[in-house]
Every structure is written in C-alpha cells, then in structure tokens.
Image: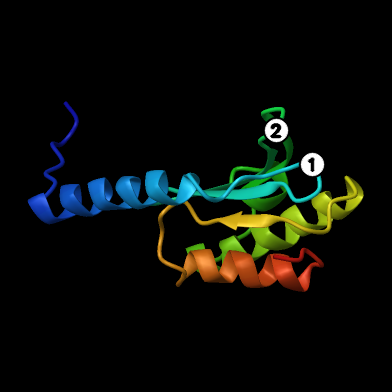
Amino acid sequence: MAPKVAFSKHTAARTVSRARRHRRVRKFVVGTAERPRLVVNRSTRHMFVQIVDDSVGHTLVSASTMDPSLRSVEADKTEKAKKVGELLAQRAKEAGITKVVFDRGGNRYAGRIAALADSAREGGLEF
C-alpha cells in the first residue's frame, strides 16, 4: 500500500495561482514561424522544454531531463536545467531556429527557470 501524500492548502493555492498566471500570459505570448514559442514545463523532479510554432500547432524542437543523454548526468536539478538549456539551444541551431519567445509557464523567473533560460541564451538562442 502506497503512503498517502498530504498537500496543504498553501500548496494547492500556489498551483492554482500558477495555472491562472499561465492562462493570463498565454493570451499575449504567441509563437510564429519566425519566432516560435519556447515553452517550459517544470515538475518537482524533471523539466520539459519545447519550441512550438503556434500558427500550425507543431513542436519543432524538444528537450528534457528524461533524454537519454541527460539521464545519466549526476547533478542537482538546477544543473540539469542548465544542461537541458544547452541541449535545446544545440537542437534549435540544428533546426535553424535562432529567435524565440519565452513562455515560462506561469513560473517565477528564478532558480531552474532562470538557469535554463541563461544556458539557452549562452547556446545561441535569442529572446
């Protein structure tokens, strides 16, 4: 029998607030063929990043901490986020993408989100 996990009201409210922020910002952050949208999805353990062309609804490039090349890396979550940013920038260059619109998914620009964005910029993405 699995142990029960209790969530506080504070945790639930934080999740609802993040989702509300994301919905509000998505009205204005739109990816095009010239500047696709860099989408960040963060869980407690992993990070998933995609570059999406919203005009046709296609994912052009993706990277995550679940990639086989990053699975074996022994590092904390912030270091892994940096590695994901580097990998995404490398794949974006290979696909001919240089400019993107950053969609942080309602998350604060701090910690893992900032580390990912900084390493993607260092890798050559412009946003």
* Residue depicted at x 51% and y 64%: 113
x, y percent for residue 88? 73, 53
Q: Is residue 98 left or right of residue 71?
A: right
Q: Amino acid at mark 1?
A: Ala
Query: Which numbered marker is on residue 33?
Result: 1
Q: Is the residue marked by circle 1 packed among few (<14), some (14-19), or many (20+) residues within 10 Å? A: some
Q: Which residue is mark 2?
A: 55
Relative to 60, residue 47 above or below: below
In front of the other: 94 or 21: 21
* Residue depicted at x 72% and y 46%: 36
Which quadrant would residue 62 be assigned to in this image?
top right
Compare marks 2 and 1 and give the one earlier in the sequence: 1
* Residue depicted at x 75% and y 51%: 35
Q: Is residue 97 left or right of residue 50?
A: right
Relative to 85, residue 19 above or below: above
Question: What is the C-alpha distance between the residues marked 2 and 1?
Answer: 7 Å
Q: Is residue 15 left or right of residue 44?
A: left
In front of the other: 121 or 5: 121
